[in-house]
Amino acid sequence: MKKFLITILSVLVFTGCSSTDNDKPPKIEKTYPSVSNFRFHEISELKEGNLLAGNYNTEGYVTHKSYCPPCPKGAMCEPCPSPRIVISEENLLIEGSPWFVNKTNKNTDLIIFANNEDQFEFNQRYIFSLSLHDFKTTDDENNDFELVGYDILQ
């Protein structure tokens, strides 16, 4: 039996059986334009609530992506909330978070309403163009931010 396992492993190694890019899920196409030339503020500055409604740029990591849980066929499920991501000055994923976040606990985290949140990768730094609205629909202290553009930072 030991000889058989060694033979199988040898065949796998020598035939090039390994993980390839084909094994990765397909990357979601970028659906937003590049960033615009807006005034830059750190996320913590945006969270202070001292800014008027308008457009701003910031940098950060995506630390949470919302998703809609499956609804069994024929069940009466609650509608899914608007798609959103959480961005942060710190590259720390939000652990054990629910399927969507309605309030952040740190002044370095910011909820951003964004469609197609699967186009963002964790552990990747981005620059974002955001529109700050004059209303709020979350439990956060600040008004709502909506994504209007982004770029990956190298």
Image: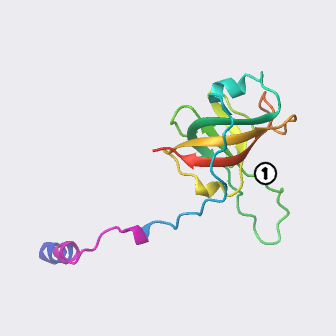
Q: Is residue 120 visible?
A: yes
Q: Position of residue 118 (x, y in %)?
A: 61, 57
Residue 130 falls within the magenta-colored stretch: no
Which picture quadrant has residue 3? bottom left
Q: Quadrant of the N terminus?
A: bottom left
Q: Which residue is mark 1?
A: 82
Tell me which amino acid carries mark 1. Answer: Ser
Q: Residues within 10 Å of mark 1 (few under 14, many from 20)?
A: few
Residue in the picture at 63% in, 35% down: 58
Q: Nearer the viewer, residue 93 or 128?
A: 128
Q: Nearer the viewer, residue 102 or 136?
A: 136
Residue in the picture at 87% in, 34% down: 134
Q: Position of residue 57 (x, y in %)?
A: 66, 36
Q: Quadrant of the C terminus?
A: top left
Give the magenta part as a residue range.
Answer: 10-22
Please give left or right for residue 130 compared with residue 61 in the image: right
Q: Is residue 106 visible?
A: no
